[in-house]
Amino acid sequence: MALTHLGAKGEANMVDVGRKAETTRTAIAEGFVSMRPETLEMILAGDAKKGDVLGTARIAGIMAAKKTHELIPLCHPLLLTKVAVEIEPDQALPGLKVTALARVTGKTGVEMEALTAASVACLTIYDMAKAADRGMVISGIRLVEKTGGKSGDYKVDA
């Protein structure tokens, strides 16, 4: 399978989506932030020195999705119709699971927007709690599901 962002000579280029059909496209990505149990308890209690970790990370993820084309060189700017970021505790890590959804009705997919939202939300969690726990680990950033578009649907194997 040929890579769509490479020209005939291997040079990077932006894909021409002008002739593609507009369809509703959705992508869901996830990521995890592992931390010490006491760090998780501090975040859930709302006791972090920088303030509301979960609320701030949620907003940061949404804002990041809207700026993906400014961060990833060959991404198209998209008029997103929905971005949602959910953050839930996972005692088994211990830590937090971040799930990001991006949706658009357009000519290109929103996988990069969902992945960017999940990544930046995880980075924000780290930033806001690093004074208490510099050993936190961000992991598992991946596309979980996508629907719409010419390439069809995708869902990660559980």
Image (cartoon, rainbow, N blue to C red):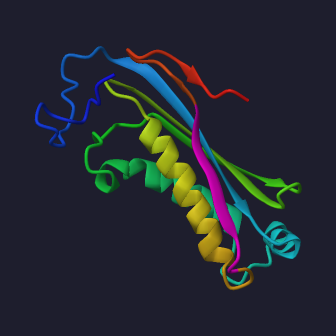
Badge count: 0
Query: Residue at 64% of width from left, 67% of height from top?
Result: 125
| Residue 12 sits above or below residue 107 on the image | below
Q: Percent x, y for residue 54?
A: 69, 62
Query: Residue at 41% of width from left, 37% of height from top?
Result: 80
| Residue 81 sits above or below residue 94 on the image | above
Query: Residue at 33% of width from left, 17% of height from top?
Result: 22
Q: Percent x, y for residue 55?
A: 66, 61
Query: Residue at 12% of width from left, 30% of height from top?
Result: 8
User: Is residue 137 or residue 77 the one in the foreground?
Assistant: 137
Residue 136 lies within the magenta run: yes
Q: Percent x, y for residue 5?
A: 24, 36
Residue 64 lies within the magenta run: no
* Drawn side of residue 53 relative to residue 94, left or right: left
| Quadrant that contains the N terminus | top left
| Quadrant that contains the C terminus | top right
User: Over which residues does the magenta segment extend?
Assistant: 134-144
Q: Percent x, y for residue 100?
A: 59, 43
* Drawn side of residue 155 relative to residue 34, left or right: left
